[in-house]
Image (cartoon, rainbow, N blue to C red):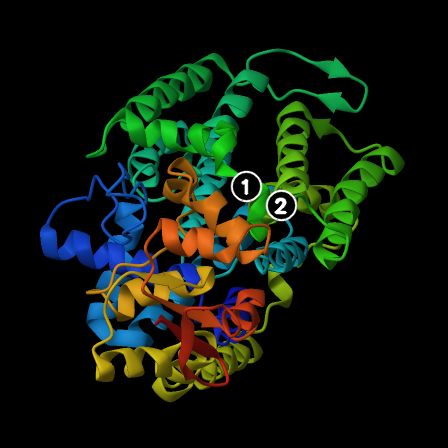
Amino acid sequence: MLASTLVALAVLTVGSRFNDPDLWWHLRTGQIIWNGRAIPRTDLLSFTTGQHAWVAHEWLSQLSIYAAWRAGSYPGLMLWFCVAVAALLVIQYTLCCLYSGNAKAAFLGALITWFFATVGLAIRPQLMGFIFLACELLILHMGRWRDWRWFYLLPLLFALWVNTHGSFFLGMIVLAAVLVSGSFEVNAGLLQSRVFDPARRKTLLWASTLSLGALFANPVGWQLLAYPLRTIFDGRMQLGAVMEWQRLSFDDPRAFGLIALAGAILLIALIRRTVLYVDEAVLLAVAFGMAVLHQRLLFASGIMATPILCRQLAGMWERFPRVRDRTLPNAILIFTSLGVTIAAFPSPASLAAQVRRGNPVEAVDFIRRTHLSGRMLNDYVYGGYLSWALPEQKVFIDGRADVYAWTGVFEDYGRWATLRDDPNRLLDRYRVDWCLLSQSAPLTRVMRYLPGWSERYFDSQSAIFIRN
């Protein structure tokens, strides 16, 4: 019954989150893979990078997103979204329930996971990666306390994960932390280790080795494995310029939630003299550090930390006795949740309206009607949609910050968009013929007074400027 309410919560949450700037270039990449039956090895979406080397390292999730669109257009994409978020919450609820032995505490843990997940719920490959993270924690728990053969699901998990999202690297960190901390005896007051018995440790070691080998079960090769490290440590990436990669800010209520979560775990351990295990302490430190460095990783932090909190709360909260369960009220609540889920699923018209609110749909219609062509400079947040809606027109930039950072385009665009450079310098360097900009962009006001340019189209959302 509680799980059914989480499904309803998932649909209610994502109903208004359909349009995401990065959805569209993921969808376009999935289309390229589907039609070409191959993973692109160079940039095919923009003209500014000169077909620089670029690999779709999230190709499997991008293919699934495109398959959802082929199956049902916008409703198909929304169904993919709802199923993925519902699966994440139910898997996390199951993990917390088994880990703590308390269904009530586990439900609270699932709600906390949902709270942190709202920082990044979108139709994007990272959602698949975080589902796999929750699955990994569940497999590790089942292998430790139930049947050691659960560990042999890990190689299959990583074989899928590496082709889906770069968070597989975090999964390997989690696996290493659990394996190492379970191999040594630690007894330092409230901090203790949970040592594997020899048979389970040997099985997990073999499964970890096979998981490492499974990372090479990808059609790209070692470049796919190096991508997460390259993203983090390549200075050209300028992650601080992208909002979701910036450090945690305290104007976000989730920042206070993160502090409260970590503080609650430590305070409960100190006040109730509850043991904190070494692997839990390591995972908690990793989760907290990730979230502080990059706010988008609040999502993963919630998944990693909430089972620990649920175990701490289990002793403070009465377990629900099965003899008190009532079938009819539960059934009524389950069908109520099902009704809410169906009623809350957005209609095709509401999904199309979300797309129109967030993207230059009318401007694209104008471009098609007037057969406007040439080199286009587009607003950063429009790039993904334009690559999907105007596949014949290559974009200037989109949400793939990596390839634009490697080629210097990202820095050039940033200087232009923030008025740190003469606008004509960028326009002439890339031989731009026309611009499609958001009405809220500072450069939109500048372009209206720039010699040699005229405004050809405008609406409440966007404007088009053409070189005279």
Dot 2 and dot 1 residues touching (CB under 8 Å): yes
Q: Label for residue 246? A: 2
Of 307 and 226, the residue lying toward us? 226
Of 73 and 438, the residue lying toward us? 438
Q: Which residue is mark 1?
A: 239
Residue 111 left/right relative to 462: right
Q: Position of residue 239 (x, y in %)?
A: 54, 41
In the image, residue 387 above or below residue 180: below
Please identify the quarter of the rendering in which residue 394 is found. Answer: bottom left
Q: Position of residue 37 (x, y in %)?
A: 10, 49
Q: Which amino acid type corresponds to the residue marked 2 in the rendered image?
A: Gln
Q: Local crowd at mark 1 within 10 Å, few (<14), some, or many (≥20)?
A: many
Identify the residue at image location x=68%, y=31%: 285
Identify the residue at image location x=22%, y=33%: 220
Q: Is residue 85 visible?
A: no
* SS at circle 2: loop
Residue 313 left/right relative to 195: right
Q: Position of residue 425 (x, y in %)?
A: 45, 51
Residue 275 left/right relative to 379: right
Q: Which amino acid type corresponds to the residue marked 1 in the rendered image?
A: Leu
